[in-house]
Image (spheres, rainbow, N blue to C red):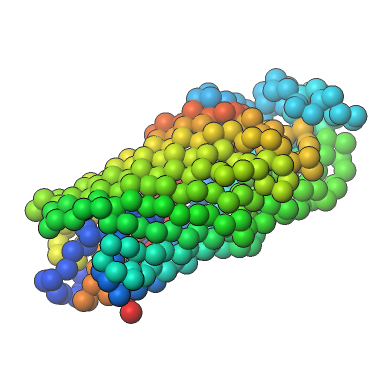
């Protein structure tokens, strides 16, 4: 990571051009933060990695042992089901490759399309039998493939030399699978292939409405801005559920280190609702199979660097975020940190 950052700084500092503005874009982790001039097109690639570990119930940490002896199993009334949870997730990672294209047919509207390739991985520990704290073994599940496709319109509301406002509206199309399967380890030491729980799936399965409002300002070497973004699920998916709606509010502050590079800091607040309905194929004595153990609130703090290469054709950004507060509808794995690296290119 350090070498990557150093290499990136060297590349960025070695080119000189006065007529550029690294602050013209928000930190790279913010999507749809800017619009384009009529006829302009932009391609982008982002890589995002998120690490999760440690279960939280509300704001409190909960150990796997406590989790499998104290948290009721939603499916306890079904045959062969234990009264409490018996499998505890211990770690999860999510890796995303995101490809984006932006095109402005005129000065008022910028169209944007974005598609992801996702790879999810979750580690678990299974406890033996229907009670007690004897660890049976660990197991891992994986799911990867195409995520949901986003089609957005960014509408300029107001623009001056120092400030701009735009509204975002669009749809997320259910191109990501919600039927991924994997082999699990049960408390009875069996290894069936089952439908994986909700956080391992690659899409929402629903058409989702995306709404947002973005504002950005400049003053000398400083830039700042904010964005509100909501994702609203329009109805239940084919499996009989819908993921929780998401509402996100973020604000950033950036400072020019030189004419090509700016450093930024960002606060991001996210509220997500629980899952409504449920997938009848997802039943297991694990928290991730329970639609009520989803969502909550999280406040992230981020640090980033944006750099512009000659003629403003190429931009590079990196941003690291970590939560300073989490209150989860738990028990749920908590976010540890995430990183976004991105390249944006205007041909
Ligand atoms: Cu763009």
Quarter of the image where the C terminus is located? bottom left
Q: In which quarter of the image is residue 72?
A: top right
**Residue 247 location (% of width, % of height):** 44, 39
User: Compared to 285, does 144 lie above or below?
Assistant: below
Q: Quadrant of residue 234?
A: top right
**Residue 70 location (% of width, % of height):** 70, 20
Residue extending farthest to the bottom is 347
User: Compared to 86, does 300 lie above or below?
Assistant: below
Q: Could you say which is closer to the camera, residue 50 or residue 347? A: 347
Which residue occupies 57% across, 25% down?
Answer: 57
The answer to whether residue 13 is seen in the rendering is yes
Q: Quadrant of residue 221?
A: bottom left
Quarter of the image where the N terminus is located? bottom left
Which residue occupies 38% across, 68% down?
Answer: 102
The answer to whether residue 136 is seen in the rendering is no
User: Compared to 109, does 265 lie above or below?
Assistant: above
* Residue 339 horizontal side relative to residue 313, left or right: right
**Residue 323 location (% of width, % of height):** 42, 38
Which residue occupies 80% across, 48% down?
Answer: 194
């Amino acid at each position: 990571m350090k070498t990557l950052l150093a290499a990136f700084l060297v590349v960025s500092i070695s080119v000189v051009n006065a007529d550029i503005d690294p602050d013209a874009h928000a930190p790279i982790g913010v999507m749809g933060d800017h619009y384009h001039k009529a006829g302009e097109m932009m391609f982008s690639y982002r890589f995002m990695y998120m690490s999760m570990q440690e279960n939280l119930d509300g704001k409190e940490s909960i150990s796997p042992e406590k989790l499998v002896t104290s948290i009721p199993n939603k499916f306890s009334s079904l045959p062969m089901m234990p009264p409490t949870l018996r499998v505890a997730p211990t770690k999860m990672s999510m890796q995303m490759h995101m490809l984006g294209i932006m095109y402005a047919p005129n000065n008022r509207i910028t169209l944007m399309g974005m598609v992801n390739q996702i790879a999810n991985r979750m580690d678990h520990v299974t406890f033996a039998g229907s009670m007690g704290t004897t660890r049976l073994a660990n197991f891992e599940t994986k799911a990867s493939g195409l995520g949901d496709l986003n089609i957005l319109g960014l509408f300029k509301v107001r623009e001056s030399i120092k400030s701009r406002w735009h509204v975002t509206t669009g749809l997320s199309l259910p191109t990501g699978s919600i039927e991924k399967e994997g082999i699990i380890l049960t408390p009875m030491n069996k290894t069936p292939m089952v439908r994986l729980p909700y956080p391992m799936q690659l899409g929402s399965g629903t058409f989702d409405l995306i709404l947002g409002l973005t504002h950005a300002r400049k003053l000398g070497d400083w830039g700042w801005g904010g964005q509100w973004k909501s994702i609203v699920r329009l109805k239940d998916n084919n499996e009989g559920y819908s993921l929780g709606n998401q509402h996100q509010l973020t604000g950033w502050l950036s400072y020019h280190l030189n004419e090509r590079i700016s450093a930024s800091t960002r606060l991001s607040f996210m509220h997500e609702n629980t899952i409504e309905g449920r997938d009848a194929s997802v039943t297991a004595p694990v928290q991730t199979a329970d639609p009520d153990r989803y969502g909550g609130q999280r406040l992230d703090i981020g640090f980033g660097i944006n750099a512009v290469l000659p003629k403003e054709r190429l931009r590079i950004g990196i941003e690291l975020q970590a939560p300073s507060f989490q209150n989860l509808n738990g028990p749920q794995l908590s976010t540890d940190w995430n990183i976004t690296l991105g390249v944006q290119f205007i041909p």
